[in-house]
Amino acid sequence: MKMTAPVRFILLVIGIVIAAAALMAPRRDEWLAVLRDQDKQAQIIALLEPRLAAGDNDPDLLATLGRCYGETGNYPRAIELLNRYITLRPNDSEAYGRLADLFKSTGDVPRQIAMLERSIELAPKLSRVADLAAAYRQQKSPDQELALLSEFEADLKVKGGLLLRLAELRANTGDREGAIRVLTRPDVISASMRSTSNVDERLLLAKLLVAVGRSGEAVRLGKQWILQWHEAWLADRLLRGIVLQAPVGDASELADAVVALHPEVRLFLAHGLTAMGAKPVARHLLETWPHANPAASMNEIAGFLSISREQDDPAIVWQAFADVLRHPSSIDLVTHYTEAIAAEFGIGALAPFWASLPQAVIERRPLLIARLAFHEHNLALTKWPLGKVDLGAFGTSDRRMWIDLLGAVTSPPEMFEVLRDRRRNGDLPPDLLPKYTRLAGGLGQEIEYRAALGDLRARVK
């Protein structure tokens, strides 16, 4: 029967569809892969166990079932099947690695180690080396761990921590030079690196260099690293890591590099170094603080004085103040130092500098000068600056100090006149009015007493 063109076309299309379907239909192995990708281990086990029960001892079958049992948490069955597999294929490195993972999951570290050793023997793989090193560490076998990492030293990278661990192990055995050689490589010391991933390696290298007498090299590298990190906390860690072992000169040089890049941490560093026993370097930072802060604020100077006091060596402060008085960059700076020293060490601390205080400071801080004069028992000089004080610019405690000083260097009638004049000029703060009222009453100044009493009653209302 002769087919027409339309019929031939239809049959051709049907043939193409059937062929495509046949090509697209997944074979058994492909179905297993699809199921595995979809996390269908239980279905795979159900498909393959009958084959195993029927005596099929195919290695791929054993490997697939072992993997699926492992992923479902049936570790004993997975171990049994993979052991059967490696009997058939004893040179499969990855199979030993999988068995090691299973033994790790069951807590059987000795058998985990045995499997890892065999896996690495067949095909060295850095990830398995890391696993084996961790297992040795868990078993407290540093000699085996050291031997393993030394064997693969050329392949070790900063990432993962194996390079650091090898250096630590060598240092722990006393082989500091060997540890230094491990760490003296571009990915640790390179001046071009910006990452902080090698911080621990660098910190250990710096400590080791100092320990073997190469502190100058540690400082040179440290300066490079500080610039690369540009992080104050990392610079602080580096400095603290070597400061107690390095010569004071080298440690001070590194400290200078830190505060040059991070000037805001100088006092924090000095405090921390003092606390950890590195007083000479802390003192160096404090001695150079005034020069580095020629326009320091009152709060900054107060911080400097407080931390200097922790050194139990006030000479740092006296030298700084003397230098400021000899070469004052501004009257504000001298004034800040004067007030801060009085607050931190007491008014008597200013006595040695009395003759050096600029007249402008005396005019700016008359109450402070009055206190100093009184401390020096110069009652006549105490009176003059008290008359210059602007009480409205003071707080309650300073006003109380002012009136107490006034009472100490004047007679009651003289004190009454000073207070009366200030009251009439509107320059007597309300908190001093009660004392003035009592003084007026005690002296029989009836008119002033009643007027002041009236002011007090009005304020109460």
Image (spheres, rainbow, N blue to C red):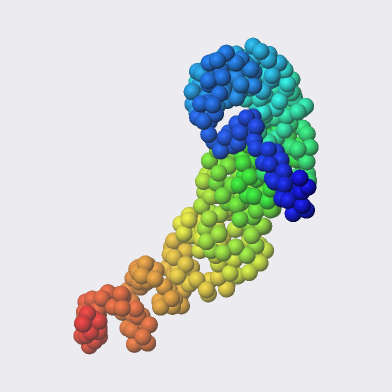
Looking at this rendering, what residue extends furthest in the front direction?
A: 1
Give whichever of 441, 277 is nearer the camera: 277
Instruction: Identify the image quadrant of the C terminus.
Output: bottom left
At a point 49% along the width and 23% down the height, the residue shown is 74
Q: In the rendered image of this protein, does residue 458 appear above or below residue 303?
A: below
User: Can see residue 76?
Assistant: yes
User: Can see residue 200?
Assistant: no
At a point 75% along the width and 25% down the height, the residue shown is 153
- How many marks the image carries: the answer is 0
Q: In the rendered image of this protein, does residue 113 appear above or below residue 411?
A: above
Report the side of 256 relative to 74 (left or right).
right
At a point 70% along the width and 30% down the height, the residue shown is 163
Residue 389, image x, y percentages? 44, 76
Give whichever of 89, 248 is nearer the camera: 89
- Asked which quadrant contains residue 294, the reply is bottom right
Residue 12, image x, y percentages? 74, 47
